[in-house]
Structure formats: C-alpha cells, structure tokens
Amino acid sequence: MNIAISDSWVENHPVTQQDKAAMAAMRAIVEPNKGRMQGTAARAAFDGIMSRVKAPSGVTFHEDKLGEVSGWWCRPANIQPGKAIVHLHGGWFNWGSAQAFRHLVGHIAAQTQVEAFIPEYRLAPEHPFPAAIEDAQSCYRELANRGTPLIALTGDSAGGGLALSLLAMATKSVFSNGVIPVGAVVLSPVTDLTLSGQSWQSRAAADPYFIQSQAAGLVKAYLAGTNPNNPLASPLYGNLAGLPPIRIHVGDDEVLLDDSRRYVEQAIEAGVDAKLDVWEGMSHGFLGGIGNFNASAQVLEAIGEFLAEKFAQSKP
C-alpha cells in the first residue's frame, strides 16, 4: 500500500528489480529477529550492524570533542571551510555510537564535501530525556561559538527526530549565537513518541525490523515519565513555523512511514520549504545498504544536491 501521491510535497520512487531482489535477500537474514532487539543488551549487536556499512573513499575519521560532548569527525579530502554538518545517529535513543555510524555519515560528508560531526550523545536508560537533546544542543552551540557560520543538520531514525528538535531550537533560541541552520535532511525520523501513526498498523507486516511493543519499551526507557507530546521529544507536536528547509527520506515498508508523512504535512501547512521522498520497497535504514541498493546511491545524491544548494544560498 502506497501513499496517495496527490500532494506536490511527496515524491514516490518506484523500486527497481535489482533493489527488489537485494531487499528480499536482506529480509531473509533479518526478519527472523524482528522485534527481538530489546534494551541495553542489544547495543553490541546494533553497533555491529552499523559498523558493517561500506567505508567511503577519501574520508578520514578521528575522535574529538565539541564542548563537553565527545564524538567523531568525518572529513572529506577537500572540505569547504566555514561549513559543517551535525549528524545525530539512530538507535531508538537506547543504542548506537558515533564510532559505529562514522562510515554512514562519512558518505554524507563525502557527497557534500563538508565535514560532519557525530555527537556521542548520552543514551537511555542511564541518561533519559532530555540528555540526548541537551548534548546535541551543546555541540551546535560550540560550533557556532567557534565561528562556524554555516551549519546543516542531518540524522537518522531516533537521531532524525533529535535533528528536527535541534533544528527548531537552533532557529528560535538564542543559544545558537545567531547561527541559524541552513537546512536539515533526515532519514526515517522518529517524530511521534506517542506511536500513534497509522503505519504502525498498515506497515506492521512489511517492516522487517520493528514491532510496536518493542518500540514502546525503548521509548518508555527514554522518556522516563516525560509526556511523549513534549515537542523536544516528539518534534511532530512542535511549532514548525519559520523553520529552515527540510527534506525527509523514508522507506515505504516502514512502521515509521507516518512519522515522516505527518511531520512534512504539518511543516508545509506552517509555510516551511519541506519535501518527503518515499522509497517503494525499502525498509528502515536502507541508506546503510550503500553498494547494494540503487536507492541508497540516489538518496546520497539527493542529500548532496540539497545541502550544496542550501550552503550556497546561505550567507555567513
């Protein structure tokens, strides 16, 4: 079942036969473990999956700190000075590390020829909300204070939701030292921690990774009693007026499909330059299949074109 393409802000990308075959092979491997990754015990396995992303050529990686937050820089050979990307990694707020995501983010950096920093934000349940968004804010503030005039935000999954929350904060708060993000690109963001999107039902069978009860447990550990409607936790419930341009990419076979669709719909209604790209036949995290999926290469190209355009249009 596909989203009805009646709105100009949605673009549906048909699946190729090559991607269909590659996705079928991937599903045969991952579906037997659908919904089984639970709590902190899943961290090592999750990092192992992300560490297998093909390394980009011409990109170097090193650990650093922005303020008090550790993380990893991904630096292409010919970086453009005065520009930076902050990428918030995925993992349902309970899993993931900057080191494990460095190859994925390295591809984004290489495509844009802009250095990217991945914060090692604190994870739940040891550090529940708002620890993660506070760390993201701290990194952005430090970059702005260092005199980086042009900053873009990217993120995936839970990190995509964090990136959208940070986008609102950096646009509307004084902490950013007047440095407004040039734009944001997020992949399959978690925007609604009430888990009320219709795709939790309509894509329940199609999604090879997640089930709602699994996500509910991870979200509970993250929120630790915070109202899931809090805009800093669920950017879908924030005031989206005045935000910089936003692009969202999501697979059509994801329980998180509606988190993307509803967010972009509300952004458009608020007057934001926003667009949703839906990739038919693709599951969550398909960008990590670089080298295996045509769709992954197309998304990388689209990210590079969009960010290059927004960096060029913005003046320090």
Image (tube, helix red, strand yellow):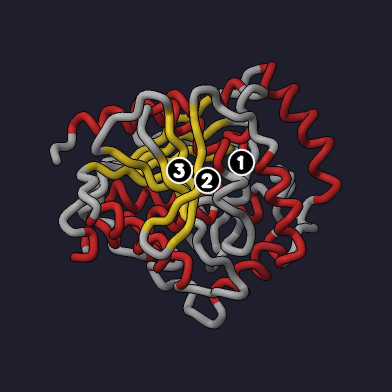
Q: Is 15 situated above or below 169?
A: above
Residue that badge 1 annotates: 285
Quarter of the image for residue 65 reads bottom left
Answer yes or no: do the residues labelled 2 and 1 have beta carbons within 8 Å? yes
Q: Position of residue 238 (x, y in %)?
A: 34, 64
SS for callout 2: loop
Q: Secondary structure at mark 3?
A: strand
Q: Which residue is mark 2?
A: 188
Residue at screen point 77% across, 33% down: 26
Q: Could you tell me residue 239's position as x and y percent?
A: 28, 63
Q: Residue at x 44, y 27 (%)?
A: 110
Q: Amino acid at mark 3?
A: Trp
Separation of marks 2 and 1 at Cα, in angstroms: 8 Å
Left or right: where does residue 266 sit relative to residue 52? left
Q: Which residue is mark 3?
A: 73
Residue drawn at (26%, 28%) of the image? 309
Q: Is residue 3 visible?
A: no
- Could you say where residue 211 lies in the image, as x and y percent from the top left? 71, 57
Residue lying at the far bottom in this picture: please name it: 225
